[in-house]
Amino acid sequence: MGVPTLFVRFGGCDYRCSWCDSLYAVLPEYRDTWEKLEPGAILDRLFALAEPPSWVTLSGGNPALFDLTDLILEGQLHGYKFALETQGSIHKPWFRHLDHLTVSPKPPSSGNVTTPRETLLALCAAGTATTIAATTETPARVSVTRPPSTVKIVVFDEDDYRYAQAIRDLVPAIAFDPPLEFCLSVGNARPSQGEDPDPAALMDRYRWLIDRALADGWHDARITPQLHVLLYGNRRGV
């Protein structure tokens, strides 16, 4: 948050979340508005917007539907750093080339729940795993060395919050290097149901989420508002 980044949004998604705020990158009826570009053409667009060093965020839809190896490796040669945002339902070996991975598993309010196992598989796909032998005091553990990674969970309500806790409680079974960062993000309005973004409601939900995590003593999670919604609503191209 607060770091300039160029967004490359990929069309198509294997989910249909009830509160998706980028249906123009998900639904097939918008396909005529999408462009098919080779990695070199994408890089040309990036150069026109901002020369490196700069962050590039691969978003969607679900970018994991594609093989983005060439785009990432060629872009890194030019000095760009690449971040990926995906729900974790699909995991690919090219994740390990990223400079940052954000897995955003979808909670119950989305209508498309990402299982904790899918979340962990996506995180592990980004790295190299080794097994730590069991001792009399501790069970066997898996150590995964991978790019800096964040688990970001959108929270609308109590069910979503408990889902986030369930994801968090699975992580100690794996020793991630570097350690995972947990982020809880308050949910945006549900534009698919005709509701416009309401900044006041967003901030009320943000305060509730902060109080809920503090009451539980969950102090190692980064809790964020939907900053882009507060600034721009659901406008595109900003």
Image (tube, rainbow, N blue to C red):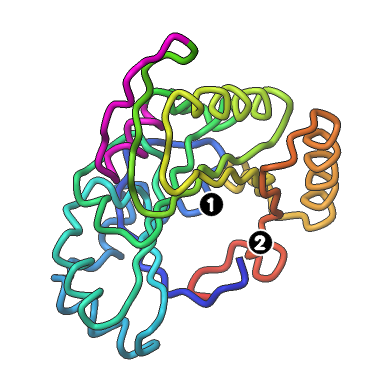
Q: Is residue 202 left or right of residue 98?
A: right
Checking the image for residue 226, the label placed there is: none
Q: Is residue 125 magenta?
A: yes
Residue drawn where x is 38% and y is 71% of the image:
56
Q: Position of residue 130 (x, y in %)?
A: 26, 32
The answer to whether the residues at label 2 and label 1 have Cβ atoms under 8 Å apart is: yes
Q: Which residues are magenta?
A: 118-136
Height in image: 28 above or below 106?
below
Q: Is residue 38 left or right of residue 19?
A: left
Where is mark 1, residue-wise? 21
Height in image: 132 above or below 40?
above
Residue drawn where x is 41% and y is 32% of the image:
119
Residue 187 visible in this rendered orientation of the protein: no
Q: Mark 1 belongs to which amino acid?
A: Asp
Q: Position of residue 189 (x, y in %)?
A: 67, 47
Q: Nearer the viewer, residue 85 or 127?
A: 127
Where is mark 2, residue-wise? 229
* Number of numbered callouts drawn: 2
Q: Is residue 183 magenta?
A: no
Residue 34 visible in this rendered orientation of the protein: yes
